[in-house]
Image (cartoon, helix red, strand yellow):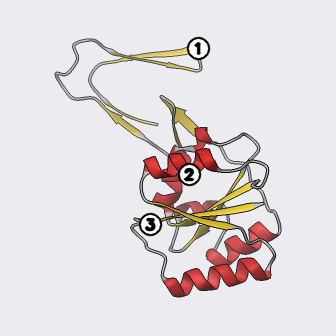
Amino acid sequence: MYTYIKNANSSTPLAEVLNTRIQAEIKKLHISGDMHEFSSEKSLHDLLTKIDSSSTNTLVIIGDDKDLEILIGQIGRLKDDLAIGYLPITDSVFAKTLNIKDWMGGIEALAQRKIKEINVYSVGGRYFLSKTELEFEKGRTKLPINIIIDGTLSLKLPYSKIVF
């Protein structure tokens, strides 16, 4: 039911003591599952394609906001009915948005199957939660930038930095 992933190259490495405590708590609350590591977006992509949809309905990222953003960037690789869980191991903007105080609060939310739907945005097949920036080099193109949103809104811009 649950598959846990963590970034081996995270800017906030998971200490072995904390990893042991997390595994003990998820086992105690009967939400244990396979634990996998990834070290790059490529290895995460490969990992996500191998997840067995018959044995996983919740994918949980353990780490910081950057680790969650890496997973969200690859969300197009996941099946539609898969829930994403987040166990923050440091102060987290996303955890506050989800009303998760710390990793233990995340575990309790998982055990209670608390699900909060949030909007995920996409630009050019790349997914993000809060914002992304596109910047075009001055002089690289002489044509205006043409952006079409949802097939109805069309924007033509000169050189600029666009923040979604």
Please tell me which residue is depicted at 74% across the width and 47% down the height of the picture: 53
- Viewer-side label of 2, 3: 2
- Residue 138: x percent and y percent? 19, 26
The answer to whether residue 97 is left or right of residue 122 is: right
Residue holding disc 2: 47
The answer to the question of whether label 2 and label 1 lie on touching residues, with beta carbons closer than 8 A, is no
Q: Quadrant of residue 99?
A: bottom right
Whichever of labels 1 and 3 marks the residue nearer the N terminus, that label is 3
- At label 2, counting other C-alpha atoms closer than 10 Å, the crowd grade (few under 14, some 14-19, many 20 or more) is some
Q: Secondary structure at mark 1?
A: loop
- Amino acid type shown at disc 1: Thr
- Using the numbered discs, state the Cα–Cα distance from disc 1 to disc 3 in whole angstroms: 42 Å
Residue holding disc 3: 8
Residue 129 in view here: no
Q: How many marks?
A: 3
- Amino acid type shown at disc 3: Ala
Q: Residue furthest bottom?
A: 17
